[in-house]
Image (cartoon, coloured by chain):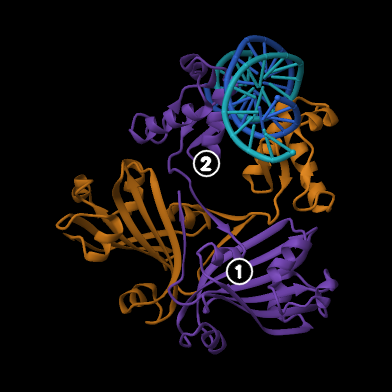
Chain colours: A orange, B purple, C cyan, D blue
Amino acid sequence: MSINYKDIKSEILTRITKGDLPPGALVPNEVELAESYGCARATVNRAMRELTDEGILERRRKAGTRVRMAPLREARFSIPVVREEIEGQAASYGYTLLNRQILHAPDWLRERLKLVVGDDVLHLTCLHRADNAPYQLEDRWINLARFPQAAGVDFAASGPNEWLISTVPFSDVEMSFGAAAATAAQANYLGCTTGDALFEAERSTWWEGRAVTFVRLTYPPGYRMTTRY
Amino acid sequence: MSINYKDIKSEILTRITKGDLPPGALVPNEVELAESYGCARATVNRAMRELTDEGILERRRKAGTRVRMAPLREARFSIPVVREEIEGQAASYGYTLLNRQILHAPDWLRERLKLVVGDDVLHLTCLHRADNAPYQLEDRWINLARFPQAAGVDFAASGPNEWLISTVPFSDVEMSFGAAAATAAQANYLGCTTGDALFEAERSTWWEGRAVTFVRLTYPPGYRMTTRY
DNA sequence: CAGTGGTCTAGACCACTGA
DNA sequence: CAGTGGTCTAGACCACTGT
């Protein structure tokens, strides 16, 4: 049995949580650690690099490695496809296309996606259900100036996200989360009351500097997005 | 000039976004890639490993490396200390302790933190301001059965988060985000109307299997948490 | 069983940056 | 300028898992 980089990681983590290595403390350099663990420097390097990526340590050449002052807290959320999210909860997935139309991009969308006046967009409204209860309302806008072929796709059977994933590349994404009062239409589809506080997620997607799509996802009252780390 | 693992990463990424390697496609194995790039297998390995960590690829021994079907997208949010978040926006930071009391943990908290009946908690309510405008309402509960020394700390001058960060270790965190209607008290402190839709973040922190603290952060209407990737 | 990724090693050179 | 981390190499053995 030789030493794993994972062993080194957890050993260092233990030292930190035990207070042996308080925030700001200098961690021995890689050569010393390699000697004391009896392993190659590359192994120590990988352990330290991962701890750094995880926000536990801070490294600077010549200055050495230190325990982060305020352990950089970072929350990670995986953004699954709705269908998989629902089926992963052992619920039956249901999908309905509520609305579909092609129109000139409204002002707010033009501004968000940096579109040109007159650019056409495909606007879709869809409802995703889990065991028949409303689960997510999808308000989707696709840039037809960029992907005219979207106009020819029938989104009656499956959602636009699944089509987009398999056919449209993207490189940059901006996501944001917030809360908003339910509009009358949202309340109707989600089975709640107008004015209810709804959790909202928005995502803008780009490829080669041009907007691909914008989506606003709205959830019924009480929905929470959770993560552990 | 030799090949960097970063070069390999971006080269593979380019192939993917260009549609050269569509979702589900099999990527050549490490030995082949190393030969075609003219570098060591370890270099290829690092590139592929990072792409896997980032959710772009999927690897299985013997089966090989494939482009993820639904590129598992992961949103990362850094959770800064409020003071730093506000000062980072070049605004002046303000802090007020609104309420402080020691009490038996209420039922909902006992359940969340798996506390025992009769355990005491320190309950603090604080308001963080940016340029004097309400920015974040902090509803903090600290497990005194675990950290009795918190009872002796004066939180009048600076928030409990800063104290906790520097003195209390933690290993497990659960965060969740959602929306809720403003209570009368929240509306009062945040300068909005009762019933307004508010964005809410909750965090439970654990160490050595025991609850450390629970906090609920509430933001004024319109607040959004944003990230890019 | 055989192919693929996972990890370690011992050594080397380089890039950055603090003293 | 000297110390530290960043990366690469060539080779090795191992762990897992599809066929």
Q: Is residue B8 above or below residue B193?
A: above
Mark 1: which amino acid?
A: Glu
Q: Tell me where residue D14 appears, x and y as whole percent.
A: 73, 22
In front here: B34 or A28?
A28
Disc on res. B202: 1
| Residue at (53, 58) in percent of width and height | A89
Residue B31 seen anywhere in this rendered image of the structure: yes
Residue B153: quarter of image: bottom right
What chain letter is assigned to the residue under label 2? B
B67 lies left or right of B96: left
Residue A117: quarter of image: bottom left
Q: Tell me where residue D9 appears, x and y as whole percent.
A: 60, 14
SS class, disc 2: loop
Disc on res. B54: 2
Residue A158 seen anywhere in this rendered image of the structure: no
Q: Is residue D7 above or below residue A56?
A: above
Mark 2 residue crowding within 10 angstroms, few (<14) / some (14–19) / many (20+): some
SS class, disc 1: strand
| Residue at (78, 84) in percent of width and height | B103
A212 lies left or right of A104: right
A67 lies left or right of A203: right
Mark 2: which amino acid?
A: Glu
Marks 1 and 2, Cα distance to the nearest angstrom?
Answer: 26 Å
Q: Disc 1 vs disc 2: Cβ atoms closer than 8 Å?
A: no
Is tag 1's residue or tag 2's residue first in the polypeptide sequence? 2
